[in-house]
Amino acid sequence: MAKILFINASENRNGNTARLGTKLLAGEDFEQVNLVDYKAYQIGQSFNDDQFVEIYHKMATAETIILGTPVYWHDMSAYLKTLIERISQRSGSNELAGRKVGLLIQGANLIDAIKPVSSVIKRFCQVAGMTYIGNASTTLGLAKIKKQLNN
């Protein structure tokens, strides 16, 4: 299993969000999960082909999770929002406790999106017992997170 899991919550597998993640993780042992390639249904929906458990298992076996999202309508992507909501609905033990989590936010109108998206991810980490290591929205901000990867 990869030490670092990069979750690309963009509809574009190789778009700007993926490029930002790849730049951050250059030289690191990481696995990229493109949420667009998985079926993770909304809360309350139950279908046999749901792949949420596969994504969750990858998160639970990684040491560090980097969440990458484009900004759509001044917020995180629906892919990332659905993932967070599904995780919050899991009952029982929390296999994500102790993980480090970084956030990459990419897109237009970042000024309006960075604070609310970061706040949601920080709170998500707090509730799940994970450590939030920061966010970046440009290549200049990547150094802060890169420094935390191996600490």
Image: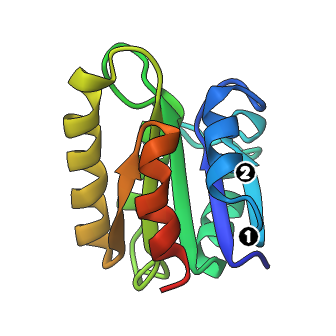
Is 70 on the left-hand or right-hand side of 117?
A: right
* Residue drawn 76% across the image and 75% down it: 2
Is the Cβ of the residue at disc 1 closer than 8 Å to that at disc 2? no
Query: Looking at numbered disc 2 in the image, what kind of residue is underneath it?
Result: Val
Residues 59 and 131: in front is 131
* Residue drawn 47% across the image and 72% down it: 147
Q: Which picture quadrant has residue 92?
A: bottom left
What scheme was used to colour the molecule? rainbow
Residues 122 and 39: in front is 122
Q: Position of residue 58 (x, y in %)?
A: 68, 68
As helix, strand or loop, the secondary structure at mark 1 comes to loop
Q: Which picture quadrant has residue 89?
A: bottom left
Residues 149 and 45: in front is 149
Q: Position of residue 131 (x, y in %)?
A: 34, 75
- Vertical arrangement, residue 143 with respect to residue 106, above or below: below
As helix, strand or loop, the secondary structure at mark 2 comes to strand
Q: Which residue is mark 1?
A: 28
Determine the CA span between mark 1 and mark 2: 15 Å
The disc, 1 or 2, on the residue closer to the chain's N-terminal end is 1
Q: Position of residue 126 (x, y in %)?
A: 23, 70
Q: Position of residue 107 (x, y in %)?
A: 47, 21
Q: Which residue is mark 2?
A: 33
Quadrant where the image shows the N terminus: bottom right
